[in-house]
Image (cartoon, grey):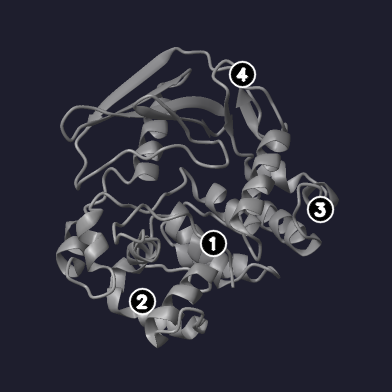
Amino acid sequence: MPQAAIRGRITAVPVQHELRVDVRPRWVFRLRGGTPDGLFRRGGDGVRRLIHVGDVPVLVGAVQASGERVIVGARSASEAACEEGVRRMRFALGLDDDLRPFHEAFRDDPHIGRVVRALPHLRVRRRPNAWEAFMWAVCEQLIAYEDAVEIQRRIVRALGRSCPATGLWDAPPPGVVAAQAPARLQSFGLTQARAVALRRAAIEVARGRVDLEHPDHEAGWRRLMAIPCIGEWTVEMTALMGQGRHDQIPAGDLGFVKLVGRLTTGHPKARAEISQVREFFARYGEWKGLAGEYLRAAGASTPSGAARVPVPAGTRW
């Protein structure tokens, strides 16, 4: 079996167990495509992903079936790993999120109501684990999103684990990142400061001093924010995309700085302060993060006024 401490390890997936779960989402659902980093792959009517449960590789996939059903499946050498793989895929896709209270509360909201009605299936696009969300958030700090994706892809190819039979990759675990010299991480395109910060965070997680999956998320956030270059935006992105926290909004995101500035002043080039972004989203209470996705969609409306699915988060302001 593959070892998490070995970088770039080729993963074989001996299939001894298969699990298939027929899920009826708790709210309107539409399966989205792959991700720019190449980890989620779209093929036909489904999306696939390689993940690891500890050192055990699991191939997971989801298919939009007839009606409102979604079939989630997993293949692995371990029955327990299959069950965990299905759980993580359901989390990443948001299949079990009951979004009815959000839609009932904000379908007539003056800022996002039109898009809430037009795109009832919209969800936050999550990662299957919080470490991956954190690592990608560090890559996206103060850099154009397209450039951040290139860094992510380099990290995956150099340090991740692959399954050649499927062409799928998994992001490197914290132990692998912790074992790298900062200069190695810099070679992927990170600045020196962010390479050092990512390695220090990886050491904290790998040694168990920070548990990003623990229900007490705030304790982990505080410890991570003690590391230079790890601030509120990074942990808010981690919370939203890796821990399922709809109540968190990455207020320092450049996209929100521009959108809120335009909405509150009427000037197309205005930029809000981070405090003003937080004040704007306070009206959405426990749904700030999901409201942010809808605000992006509203800002990305076509000239005809038809809403479209928003682009991913931008960068820290």
* Image quadrant assignment for residue 229: bottom right
Label 1, on which residue? 314
Disc 4 + disc 3, Cβ < 8 Å? no
Left or right: 274 with respect to 204?
left
User: Between marks 3 and 2, how big is the CA–CA gap?
Assistant: 37 Å
Label 4, on which residue? 164
Q: Earlier in the sequence, mark 3 or mark 2?
A: 3
Disc 1 + disc 3, Cβ < 8 Å? no
Label 2, on which residue? 281
Task: Give the crowd class for mark 2: few <14, some 14-19, many >=20 residues within 10 Å.
Answer: many
Left or right: 91 with respect to 152?
left
Label 3, on which residue? 182
Above-or-below relation of 133 to 220:
above
| Camera-side residue of 134 and 65 | 65
Three-letter code, disc 2:
Phe
Does the image show residue 214? no
Q: Earlier in the sequence, mark 1 or mark 3?
A: 3
Q: Position of residue 23 (x, y in %)?
A: 23, 33
Q: Position of residue 317 (x, y in %)?
A: 59, 73
Count numbered badges in the picture. 4
* Foreground: disc 1 or disc 4: 1
SS class of the residue under badge 4?
loop
Three-letter code, disc 1:
Gly
Left or right: 249 with respect to 254?
left
Task: Give the crowd class for mark 1: few <14, some 14-19, many >=20 residues within 10 Å.
Answer: some
Disc 3 + disc 2, Cβ < 8 Å? no
SS class of the residue under badge 2?
helix
SS class of the residue under badge 3?
helix
Q: Position of residue 312 (x, y in %)?
A: 48, 54
